[in-house]
Image (cartoon, grey):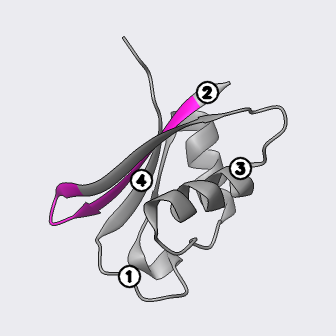
């Protein structure tokens, strides 16, 4: 079980964010992504191998407006593994 922090960023400021717990054994990356997008009320972006690789290797991935089929009004959507202190 891990925590994922989803951030919607516009003009270098976080305008929406949500943290969710994810059961990594029973949930796919796409299911987690679409669930988080639903909670943030944004469209689900196109998931590329680059996004999955960045998330698995670096613990963070960024989606730009070009990664969405629908038009979005923010600069980027960031998924990050939430590390509590």
Mark 2 or mark 4, which is nearer to you? Answer: 2
Residue appearing at x 35%, y 50% in the figure: 17
Which x, y percent locates residue 80? 46, 40
Q: Tell me where residue 84 sits by quadrant.
A: top left
Q: Distance between the residues labelled 3 and 1?
A: 22 Å
Q: Is residue 7 magenta?
A: yes
Q: What element carries label 4?
A: strand
Residue assigned mark 1? 72
Identify whether 53 is placed above or below 35. Answer: above
State the residue position of label 2: 2
- Residue 71 location, x and y as percent? 42, 88
Question: Going by the image, does 2 lie left or right of 5?
Answer: right
Q: In what element is the residue under mark 3?
A: helix
Residue 78 numbered tag: 4
**Residue beneath label 3, please?**
29
Instruction: Using the numbered discs, state the Cα–Cα distance from disc 4 to disc 1 in whole angstroms.
Output: 14 Å
Image coordinates of residue 48 in percent, x first then y, are: 65, 65
Is there a contact, CB below 8 Å, between mark 4 and mark 3? no
SS of the residue under disc 1: loop
Which of the marked residues, 2 or 3, is nearer the chain's N terminus? 2
Residue 68 versus residue 37 in the image, above or below: below
Compared with residue 23, is residue 29 higher up or lower down, i.e. above or below? below
Q: In which quarter of the image is residue 25?
A: top right
Q: Position of residue 31 (x, y in %)?
A: 73, 55
Which tag, 3 or 1, sits closer to the chain's start? 3
Q: Earlier in the sequence, mark 4 or mark 1?
A: 1
Instruction: Give the residue drawn at x 38%, y 82%.
Output: 72
> Dot 3, how many residues are within 10 Å of its Cα: few (below 14), some (14-19), or many (20+)?
some
Q: How far apart are marks 2 and 3 (CA)?
A: 12 Å
Which residues are drawn in magenta?
3-14
Q: Quick one: SS at disc 2?
A: strand
For marks 2 and 4 on the same chain, the one whose residue lies earlier in the sequence: 2
């Amino acid at each position: 079980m891990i925590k994922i922090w989803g951030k919607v960023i516009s003009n270098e400021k976080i305008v929406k964010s949500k943290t969710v717990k994810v059961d990594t054994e029973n949930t796919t990356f796409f299911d987690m992504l679409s669930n988080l997008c639903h909670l943030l009320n944004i469209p689900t972006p196109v998931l590329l191998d680059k996004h999955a690789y960045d998330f698995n290797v670096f613990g963070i991935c960024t989606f730009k407006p070009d990664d969405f089929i629908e038009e979005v009004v923010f600069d980027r959507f960031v998924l990050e593994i939430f590390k509590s202190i």
